[in-house]
Amino acid sequence: MRQKNKGSNICRFVFVMLMTLFMISPLPAVEERISLNFQETPLQEIMSMLSQQQRINILISEGITANVSINLYDVTVDKAVRSITDAAGYAVEYRNGNYYIMNHDDIGKYNITGLTELRTFKIQYSDPSVIEGILTNYLSGYGKITILAERRILVIQDRPSVLKRMDALLKELDKEPKQIFIEAKILEVTLKDNESFGLDWKHLFSSSTDSGSFGTRGLSDPTSPGFFFSFVNPNVELVLNALKTRGRLRTLSTPKLLAMENQQAETLIGNNIGYQVTVTTNDVTTTSIEYLESGIILRVTPSVDRQGRILLDIHPEVSTGTVNDDGVPSKSTTQVNTQMLVPDGQTVFIGGLIKQTVDETREGIPILGDLPGIGNLFSNKSIISTDTETIVLVTPRIVSPDIANWQPQEIENTQYINNILDAELGKSELKTNELLDPQKQEITQKQSTEVESNNHPLGEEYDHLIY
């Protein structure tokens, strides 16, 4: 009987010992052997690295800050955590599968629920400093954020419940931005004497339907200066092609931009004219070179709403600049700043940008016309004033990641991009992007022939816009 009880007691003792060893022994993950080498590195950063690489939980008490220099070779993860903590002058406890780092005075009595946890967040697309400013507003009284700007990392120390909310918030803030392919055409129409305020586009847009036009709303009266915009319709395409055939329309530029959402994209076709700027301060004179931008400039900042529509902040500019003999720069500019909400793939028409160009020409008898004093008797000077209207056509499209990764030379292949984007959007054609395209010369000639004939596809009321 005693022998039986003795055997039973031994079994109980072995069971208790095994359970005790199981509860106090490290997890298998922390038994792996590693080597570490750090010089003057924050304790929080080292523990964050160990937590991520070894998949162990490390919680750090509020106020734990120290830099550590260590060199450990072929030690277990458990040994590394304890050695690093000891070198920093703090204590560590392993309880319930977690390491708790704290002051020595708090060993065995610290309220675990009051401890903070350390996590790192990699910022992929947004500005880390902007994200830091936003997340700081959501920290608890025990929280702290450290930014590693060069590595685009935020190290956040706070209660686990707060870190969970931070993680969810970051997923909303740091989303991959959309990219928008923007194709623009900047055109110039030569105006006749009775068109000092621009062409009467109102007749072309008055037949627009609600499906893709503002109608006449937003269009300025052609008897007064000012710009207007609307969605392009087939009537506009016909008139522009006819104007080109008549020699009244020329293409100034056809820029193509691949812009990131909420960031400005800019293209400049023109010159940077340099001029000297002299500044004297306290009898010290300094001279620097500044530049005057002139030419054809298009600045566009796109963004996308939840319905997939594109908000364009657009600034087209056509300018000429000069620097006189005294070094004073001057600039003549036709420009507009506007915002518009555009369906994906829809072309927007901007018109009403009027400018006047004055050219002075002189003709005369060679040699005699250049003689001082009497040269005017053998020469003739004429001044020609020309009014023109600048027209801008803009077509924005949201592109897929595959197109967004293309090289610039591939973006130049507009027709190829249009075909792919049309397939994505489920469209069979997009005539506006074919406007004035050499590949569509046959269509243009056919349309021009119809305008010249008695068929009048636009009606006789539009003849004054063309001839």
Image: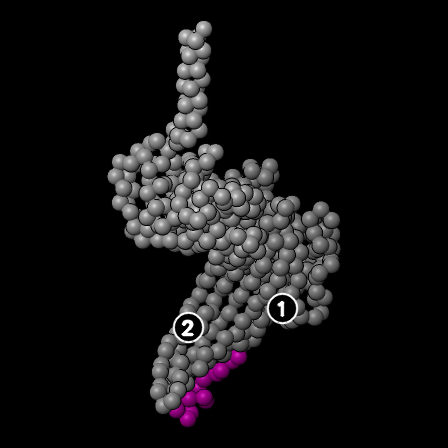
Q: In this view, does 465 lie to the left or right of 252?
A: right
Asked if residue 40 lies in the magenta stretch, the reply is no
Question: What's the CA distance linking mark 2 and mark 1?
Answer: 35 Å
Quadrant of image for the C terminus: bottom right
Q: Which mark is residue 291?
A: 2
Pick out the residue farthest to the front.
2
- Of 21 and 255, which appears nearest the observer? 21
Residue stretch rendered in magenta on the structure = 371-383
Would you say residue 403 is visible in this rendering?
no
Judging by the rendered image, the residue that carries numbered circle 1 is: 192
Viewer-side label of 2, 1: 2
Type of residue at label 2? Tyr
Q: How is the structure coloured here?
A: one colour
The residue at the point 39 percent across, 30 percent down is: 25
Q: Residues within 10 Å of mark 1 (few under 14, many from 20)?
A: some
Type of residue at label 1? Lys
The residue at the point 67 percent across, 70 percent down is: 225
